[in-house]
Image (spheres, grey):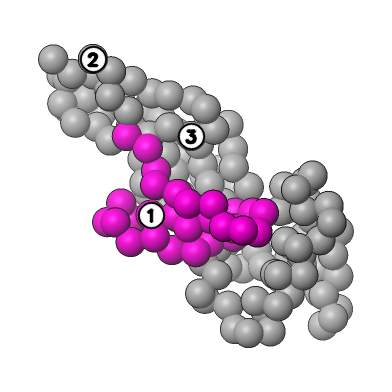
Amino acid sequence: MEHVNTVKTVKSKYPHIEWIDLLNNGVLVECAIVKKTSTGDVHFFPVDHLDIVDQRRLLGIVSNRNATAFPLWDLMRQVTLNNGCNALEYFHQLTKVRTPSGQIFEPSLGRRGAYVLSPMSAKGGDHGDIEAEGVKAPRRGK
């Protein structure tokens, strides 16, 4: 029998906002999803880290009439905030990346998540695979 672990997420009423179990501890955190990659990486920032001014700025972006047509990074790229900054540059300082294996790191050139079988999984042990963007990694078992 094939088993697949999945990252627990709950969609919000707004596009690009999801509740994510970031640490696989059963606690959902409201996050803005900037980008999802084909390798399963999720570029995000927690909404609760924003002050009320930045929350309103984000709400203006995700409630835009084109919000469902484009990824959040593309929407932000096209917006200049009332402080004169580009929204993508402004919110990028808060952005983190969560890999399919659950690691969280700051985005940088030359770093991205990868699906790699651990020595334990090659022997049929637990390796915490996840499903991301329709890609299923089978869990090897007995």
| Residue 7 visible somewhere in the drawing | yes
Please identify the quadrant where the N terminus is shown.
Answer: top left
- Picture quadrant of residue 141: top left
N-terminal of the two: label 1 or label 3? 1
Decide: is 105 above or below 4.
below
Residue labelled with disc 1? 21
Amino acid type, residue under disc 2 in the picture = Met
Amino acid type, residue under disc 3 in the picture = Ala
Residue labelled with disc 2? 1
Q: Residue at x 79, y 44 (%)?
A: 69
For disc 3, the neighbor class at 10 Å (few under 14, some 14 to 19, many from 20) is some
Q: Nearer the viewer, residue 124 or 67?
A: 67
Using the numbered discs, state the Cα–Cα distance from disc 2 to disc 1 in whole angstroms: 26 Å
N-terminal of the two: label 2 or label 3? 2
Q: Residue at x 38, y 54 (%)?
A: 21
Q: Secondary structure at mark 3?
A: strand
Q: Secondary structure at mark 2?
A: loop
Residue labelled with disc 3? 132
Q: Are marks 2 and 1 in contact (CB under 8 Å)?
A: no
Q: Residue at x 43, y 32 (%)?
A: 131
Amino acid type, residue under disc 1 in the picture = Asp
Using the numbered discs, state the Cα–Cα distance from disc 1 to disc 3 in whole angstroms: 14 Å
Please identify the quadrant where the C terminus is shown.
Answer: top left
Q: Are marks 1 and 3 in contact (CB under 8 Å)?
A: no
Q: Residue at x 58, y 78 (%)?
A: 50
| Residue 106 visible somewhere in the drawing | no
Using the numbered discs, state the Cα–Cα distance from disc 2 to disc 3 in whole angstroms: 20 Å
Magenta segment range? 5-34
Q: Is residue 81 left or right of residue 24?
A: right
